[in-house]
């Protein structure tokens, strides 16, 4: 009993000082916090809520596609569980820890260094990989003209004793702070530590751009960055090898046991090796970081952003939502044709193309405008009782994909079985999903028969999931 009280007190002290306006729930350290088995909850709701951060190794967007080692690993784990992913982005590590304890996330799916202090309030998975911390510094200006490595090294910090009096910027909340304090004690001199709220990747970029002189990063991240910024040096280690893992709340052993069991199998597969190589060894992914379509620096989704923004105003949508739909339809490929004959950016069927005067020679602007006109047509035909703007968009997207007549059938089923026919999520979408079942498509209120409803259900769900990512990473 005393041990439980001590742990509760420790967790309370750790998180009481971190509250802000975001906080509205009880911490797991609170004695009144409702204990739950998150694994059971995840399987019941068919969704895992994960927090990650934002970098070329964790999660980013390139040409509308969501990428990143942690993101793809999370998708693989979710597939194993048979659930979808609700991904939330949080750059601040202190906030991530707090949100996990408050029950706002199931798992921290990011490259966390395993430490004894963190293990007091987190339960770590088996290691994803191992890395060490390194000093990131800038090579001398004329390093390319220097004849030998020794000549270059003479201008760099190789002996950690020389860190005395140096100012080092690090990511706030990272384990680098404690490591630098340990080094400071070991060398008997002061290291000036500045904690910034930006990512380690951003700090590395600032070293390369002469904005700061030094930072610390995990070796695996630093080496990848060195391929992008050849003027930085990442060869001075400041720690031993350390474990990198995911984390869950301390009371969620069934969840971490399941994760570990999956990792032990997954890590032996070709898929695992290819995924690791893709982000940590493949130069192609690293080159994406310099592209204008890389979300962190370029901020563009496609070559058609301007056209999409203009068209989105016609239907009063956020342009990023329309962009998510276009990516879902065509991945921004203006001349792609589907197996059923749908063509172009908006995947218009041949009859619709004729109606709006679209041919295979039509411009991207004409294609987008035709698709938006079709969306507006569906929106105008929806019952006026659908008043919520977000729900109306969901019904419009569903009609675009599955046909308005089938969506109206699903509304009638919802009304008959006690659901709200004016709400898509957890109401009408249930009957769209099940209109492929005889029980429903033979129901007397259904006028248009069988529907491949799972396609439309996933169409709407995927567009909004991607849109949430776009909103987080792409400016309005």
Image (spheres, rainbow, N blue to C red):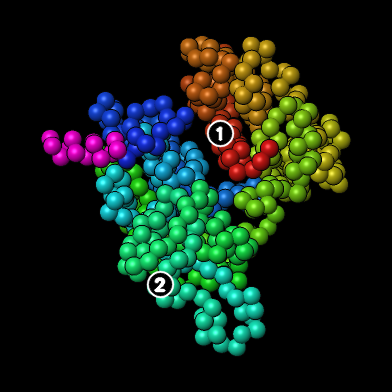
Foreground pick, 216 / 107: 216
Image-quadrant location for residue 210: bottom right
Q: CA distance from mark 2 to mark 1?
A: 52 Å
Quadrant where the N terminus is found in the figure:
top left
Image-quadrant location for residue 140: bottom right
User: What's the residue at 65%, 29% (across, down)?
Assistant: 397
52 magenta-colored: no
Image-quadrant location for residue 456: top right
Tell me which segment is drawn in magenta. Answer: 1-13
Foreground pick, 325 / 15: 15
**Mark 1 crowdedness (10 Å alpha carbons): few <14, some 14-19, many ≥20:** some
Regarding residue 17, the answer to whether it shows in the image is yes
Quadrant where the C terminus is found in the figure:
top right
Label the magenta part by its dominant secondary structure: helix
Q: Secondary structure at mark 1?
A: helix
User: What's the residue at 53%, 12% (across, down)?
Assistant: 415
Provide the residue designation for mark 1: 461
Q: Secondary structure at mark 2?
A: helix
Q: Hey, which residue is sitting farthest left in the picture?
A: 1
Provide the residue designation for mark 2: 160
Regarding residue 78, the answer to whether it shows in the image is no
Image location (x, y in percent) of residue 220: 46, 65
User: What's the residue at 50%, 70% (across, down)?
Assistant: 234
**Marker disc for residue 200:** none
């Amino acid at each position: 009993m005393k041990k439980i009280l001590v742990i509760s007190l420790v967790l309370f002290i750790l998180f009481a000082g971190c509250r802000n306006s975001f906080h509205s729930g009880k911490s797991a350290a609170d004695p009144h916090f409702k204990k739950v088995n998150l694994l059971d909850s995840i399987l019941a709701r068919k969704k895992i809520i994960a927090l990650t951060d934002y970098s070329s190794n964790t999660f980013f967007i390139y040409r509308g596609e969501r990428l990143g080692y942690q993101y793809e690993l999370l998708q693989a784990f979710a597939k194993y569980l048979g659930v979808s992913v609700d991904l939330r982005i949080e750059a601040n590590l202190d906030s991530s820890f707090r949100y996990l304890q408050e029950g706002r996330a199931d798992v921290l799916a990011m490259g966390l260094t395993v430490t004894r202090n963190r293990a007091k309030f987190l339960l770590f998975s088996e290691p994803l990989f191992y890395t060490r911390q390194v000093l990131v510094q800038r090579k001398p200006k004329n390093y390319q003209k220097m004849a030998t490595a020794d000549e270059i090294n003479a201008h760099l910090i190789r002996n950690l004793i020389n860190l005395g009096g140096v100012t080092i910027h690090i990511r706030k909340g990272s384990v680098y702070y404690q490591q630098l304090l340990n080094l400071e004690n070991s060398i008997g001199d002061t290291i000036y530590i500045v904690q910034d709220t930006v990512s380690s990747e951003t700090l590395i970029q600032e070293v390369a751009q002469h904005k700061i002189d030094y930072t610390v990063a995990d070796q695996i991240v630093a080496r990848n960055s060195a391929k992008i910024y050849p003027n930085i040096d990442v060869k001075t280690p400041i720690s031993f090898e350390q474990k990198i893992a995911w984390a869950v709340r301390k009371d969620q052993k069934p969840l971490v046991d399941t994760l570990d069991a999956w990792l032990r199998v997954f890590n032996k597969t070709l898929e695992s090796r290819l995924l690791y190589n893709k982000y940590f060894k493949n130069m192609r992914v690293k080159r994406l970081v310099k592209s204008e379509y890389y979300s962190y620096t370029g901020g563009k989704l496609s070559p058609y952003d301007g056209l999409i923004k203009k068209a989105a105003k016609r239907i009063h949508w956020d342009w990023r939502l329309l962009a998510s739909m276009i990516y879902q339809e065509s991945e921004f490929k203006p001349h792609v044709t589907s197996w059923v004959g749908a063509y172009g950016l908006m995947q218009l069927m041949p009859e619709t193309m004729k109606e709006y005067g679209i041919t295979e020679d039509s411009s991207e602007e004409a294609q987008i405008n035709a698709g938006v006109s079709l969306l507006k047509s569906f929106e105008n035909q929806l019952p006026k009782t659908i008043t919520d703007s977000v729900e109306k968009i969901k019904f419009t997207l569903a009609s675009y994909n599955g046909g308005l007549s089938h969506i109206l059938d699903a509304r009638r089923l919802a009304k008959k079985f006690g659901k709200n026919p004016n709400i898509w999520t957890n109401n009408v979408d249930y009957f769209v999903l099940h209109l492929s079942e005889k029980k429903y498509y033979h129901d007397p209120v259904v006028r248009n028969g069988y529907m491949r409803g799972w396609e439309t259900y996933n169409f709407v769900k995927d567009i909004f999931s991607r849109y949430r990512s776009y909103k987080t990473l792409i400016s309005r």
